Amino acid sequence: MRTVDIENSDNGISDKTPDESLTLLLLDNDGFSDYTSYLARGLAKYHKIIFYGFSEKSYKATGAIKEKSINFCNIAEKLPEGYSTLKGIARVFSLFFALFDILTKSEYDIVHIQEHLPAFFFFIPILKIKGKRIFWTLHDVKVFNPAKGLSGKLRVLFLKLVCQPRVVTKYSDKIIVHAQSLKEQLEANGVSEKKIHVIPHFDYGYLLDFDSVPDAPNLNFEKNIPDENILFFGDIAPWKGLEILLDAAKNVRKRFGGEFHVLVAGRSFYEDQDVSYYEALGTEERQYIQMYNKWITKSEIPILLRKSKFLVLPYTNAFKYSSSGVIPLAYTFSKPVIASNVESLTEYVDHGKTGFIFETGNSEQLANYIIELLEDNSKCAEMGKNAYEKMLLQMSLERYCETLNKLYQMREL
């Protein structure tokens, strides 16, 4: 294999010609299939890719299936279905044997994994002996405790045991994170600065082409979505600050003279308490606050985004260990955002240009910004335009893969 030396620059990467002789083994992770499939599509421009994915639907929906340089294998077919405790343990054992075949029998130069991949750490010694480089995209630098009480603690313990993030951190050649603050957190925990690289989360351009989405749109769903709503999108969890948005909405209701709608769209799969704030709302509040506590399909996402006026991310400080794909999603559809000043979020928002940043937990300040965008349609539209331009310039899939490709070629001297 021919290697290419990378010259020093501001980001540690030069602009030399790509080494197209590399073969990349790209490993998906459960829950990241859209992300990984779209990434495979972008990287196909540079390399031959062996892609083990958890979802054939994602592989098709993101357009990766059209790339001839990708050899897709559905790893989910080798795993038992379901998410009970016993099935979860069975999935780890099945994944271990699947990874054994994948990592020992495939021909590749680099293996790139996503997030905390169960059982992968077992194979690090083999990979190092064989001289394979390990790339790791880390979306959450800390294993979250999604539920209170014993069940949450047991889940974190289980994930740490089957994923061994410290081991993977130590032996990965390169770690990709989506925010500078996440890099700083890793450095504070003793991870070498040289192995951590910050690349902004890429766009969701495949969703703009509605015809590419395989699952048929739910016409009743579209009919019931109010136009120009204020959208909270994504999985509902204790650190997402839903209660802050609902408090702000009540404030807006008292002060804003016109009609508005707040739409909460996403599933709550951790605890009933995640939606207890909504369940406690009275009849009056439910006239302007609407919730879809469900899994949002790919065909429904464009409907939600196109019918929204702007998106709100009222996340709490507990989210500081993670990156979010909601902001690049909003920017893809030319929508501004109002986000709390959690560091991993503020890096994506140009205050007053692509959206607003409010003090975490300050529902009154959030209400002020909501009212400002509700009252000034031209300002909201201009921010949406700025958001889309920022996405094209800094957060496109093409730009992301160009940077990542150069990292693949980098060799330590």
Image (cartoon, helix red, strand yellow):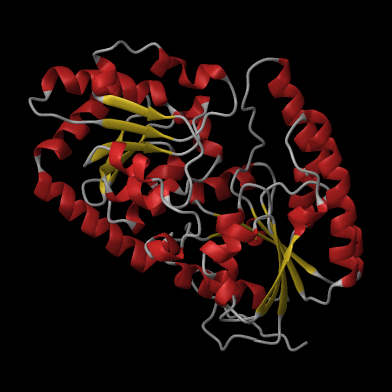
Taking the spot 30% from the left edge, 36% from the top edge, the residue there is 224
Relative image position of residue 146 (x, y in whole percent): 61, 27
Residue in the foreground of this view, choosing between 395 and 186: 395
Is 41 situated left or right of 234 in this image?
right
Relative image position of residue 341 (x, y in whole percent): 37, 36
Q: Quadrant of residue 230?
A: top left
Taking the spot 35% from the left edge, 67% from the top edge, the residue there is 392
Q: Give the mark count.
A: 0
Residue 327, compared with residue 74, is above or below; it is above
Relative image position of residue 319 (x, y in whole percent): 51, 34
Residue in the foreground of this view, choosing between 68 and 42: 68
Q: Quadrant of residue 165?
A: top right
Residue 389, compared with residue 364, is above or below; it is below
Q: Quadrant of residue 5?
A: bottom right
Whether residue 350 appears in this view of the structure is no
Is 94 situated left or right of 310 in this image?
right
Taking the spot 63% from the left edge, 51% from the top edge, the residue there is 138
Whether residue 247 appears in this view of the structure is yes
Relative image position of residue 380 (x, y in whole percent): 17, 47
- The quadrant the C terminus occupies is bottom right
